[in-house]
Image (tube, grey):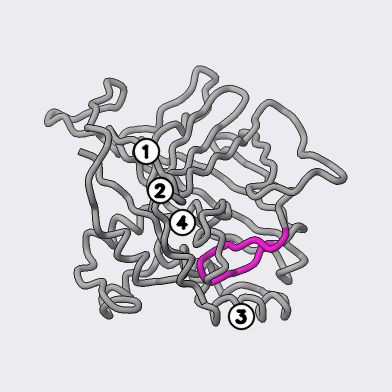
Amino acid sequence: MLVHRPALSAAVLAAALTAAAAPLSAQWPKYRSASPPRGADGSVNLLAPAPRTPAGTPDLSGVWENVGWRELQQRSGDISGTGGSPSTRALLTGGPGLFFDIAAGVAGGLPLQPWAAELKRQRMAANSKDNPDAHCLPLGNLQLHTHPQPRKIIQTADVVVVLYEGNAGTRQLFTDGRSLPANDAQPWWFGYSTGRWVADTLVVETAGFRDGGWLDVNGSPLTDRARTTERYRRTSYGAMEVQVTVDDPKAYTRPWTVTIAHRLLADDELIEFVCLENERSTRHFQ
C-alpha cells in the first residue's frame, strides 16, 4: 500500500519533520506497471538508461520524490523537539535542508540585497507564519522542488505538466515554441514557463511571478522581477537532477544556482491532497 504523506505546517520545523517520517493509511494499492525495466526478482532497475520519447528526447514522465526526505525518514529516529536530535539535524542537508533554507545549497550563501535580508530575518522571527504553505496557498516553485511530498511529470510533445501532491499544485511547461508573455502579463503564483530541449536537458524559463514570494520555509524572497531557469536531466531510469538558477535583481545582487536530486517512485502514485480539509492550525498563529 502507498503511504499517506500528511500536510506540512511551514511555521513549525518539528511538525514538518514528524510529517515526513510518519506514514498513515493509504489510498491507492500498489500497481505493477509493465513498462519499467525489471530485474529477475521483479524489482525496477533504477540504474537502467533513461527512457526516450519517439522524438528522441529523454522522457521525464513518472512520479518523483526529493531524495533527501526519504533518507531522513529512514535514518533519523528521534525527531521530537524543535529540530530533533543532533543526528537528525545533521541529516538536514540536500532536500530537507533546502526546503527550510535554500541557502544551504548555494556556495557562500544567498547574495541578498540588504532589504531582502531584513525581510527574511523578519519572516523567520515570526516563525514563518506567513508562508503561503501555512495558509494552504500555492507554494513557490523552489519549495515544490524541495518538498517532501512527490510530484508527477506528464510529458507530451507540446507541454510538460507537473502535478504536485503538496497543496495540489499544477504547472505547465510549454515546449511548443511559444514565447513568455511580454509587457503587463498578470502575475501568477507559479509564473509562466516555456521550455526547450538542449541535447538531453530540458531548459525551462519562467517569469511573471507575483511579488512577495517565498523560496523556502525561512522566507528567502522572490519578487516580480525574478526570472528562473530550470535544467531537467534524467540521468538514469530512476534518477533526475534539476538545476535551478534564480535571477532576481530586485532581491539579490547576482544570479545564483542550486541543484536538487530526485528519485523515481516506481509503481507508485500521487494521492489526493486537500489542504483546507479539517485545517485547524492557522487559528493558533500569532
Relative to the observer, which residue lies in front, 140 or 201? Answer: 140
* Quadrant hosting residue 83: bottom left
* Residue 31 placement (x, y as % from top left): 24, 27
Q: Which amino acid type is marked by label 3?
A: Gln
Say which label, 4 or 2, has the lower sequence index.
4
Measured along the vertical axis of the image, is residue 121 above or below residue 191?
A: below
213 part of magenta stretch: yes
Q: Residues within 10 Å of mark 3 (few under 14, many from 20)?
A: some
Residue occupied by mark 4: 146
Which residues are the magenta region? 211-222
Of circles 1 and 4, the one toward us is: 1
Q: Which mark is residue 122?
A: 3
Q: Residues within 10 Å of mark 4 (few under 14, many from 20)?
A: many
Say which label, 3 or 2, has the lower sequence index.
3
Say which label, 2 or 1, has the lower sequence index.
2
Of circles 3 and 2, the one toward us is: 3
* Residue 183 placement (x, y as % from top left): 87, 45
Separation of marks 4 and 2 at Cα, in angstroms: 9 Å
Separation of marks 1 and 4 at Cα, in angstroms: 16 Å
Q: What element does badge 4 sit on?
A: helix
Relative to the observer, which residue lies in front, 119 or 112? Answer: 119
Q: Are marks 1 and 4 in contact (CB under 8 Å)?
A: no
Residue beneath the point at 24% across and 41% down = 26
Q: Which amino acid type is marked by label 4?
A: Thr
Residue occupied by mark 2: 262
